[in-house]
Image (tube, rainbow, N blue to C red):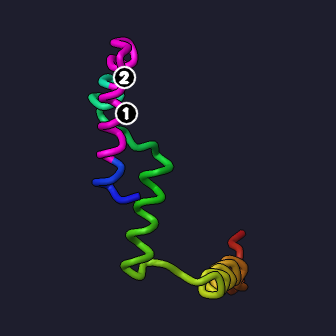
Amino acid sequence: MTIPQRKAHLKKLIDSVKDPAVLERVAKVLEKPVRQSAMVKRALKAEEDLKAGRFQTLEEFNKDMDEFIESLYAKKPKTKRRA
């Protein structure tokens, strides 16, 4: 269903309502500012990153992590202790 079709359908439903309490609830829902949850914001940001090519494949990530871990355990040259 397209947006114009959906709007027309909703208008018909609203026009058929006779109960003022129902109309009041619909008005509250429509007037309330739309808030995005943190999860929705993160998902939208992730989609932007994907479209912009800002991502790593799993193989690239694993390679980077292996290199990082290896660098943590690389042998350091021993220094002489002072007495």
Q: Quadrant of residue 65?
A: bottom right
Disc number for residue 32: none
Q: Which residues are magenta?
A: 7-26
Distance (Cα) linking label 2 and label 1: 7 Å
Q: Secondary structure at mark 2?
A: loop
Q: Please give the residue where the numbered disc 2 appears in the rendered image.
A: 17
Q: Is residue 10 magenta?
A: yes
Which residue corresponds to the image point at 53% horizontal and 81% vertical from the top-left? Answer: 56
Nearest to the observer: residue 67 or residue 9: 9
Name the quadrant of the N terminus: bottom left
**Residue 55 x, y percent position in the rendering:** 49, 78
Q: Amino acid at mark 1?
A: Leu
Residue at point 40% right, 43% down?
Answer: 36
Residue 68: within the magenta?
Answer: no
In terms of image quadrants, where is residue 58?
A: bottom right
Q: Nearer the viewer, residue 82 or 26?
A: 26
Give coordinates of residue 49: x percent, y percent: 41, 72
Quarter of the figure with residue 80: bottom right
Q: Residue 70 location in percent, x, y?
A: 70, 83
Quarter occupied by the C terminus: bottom right
- Residue underneath mark 1: 13
User: In this orientation, which residue lies closer to the viewer: 55 or 5?
Assistant: 5
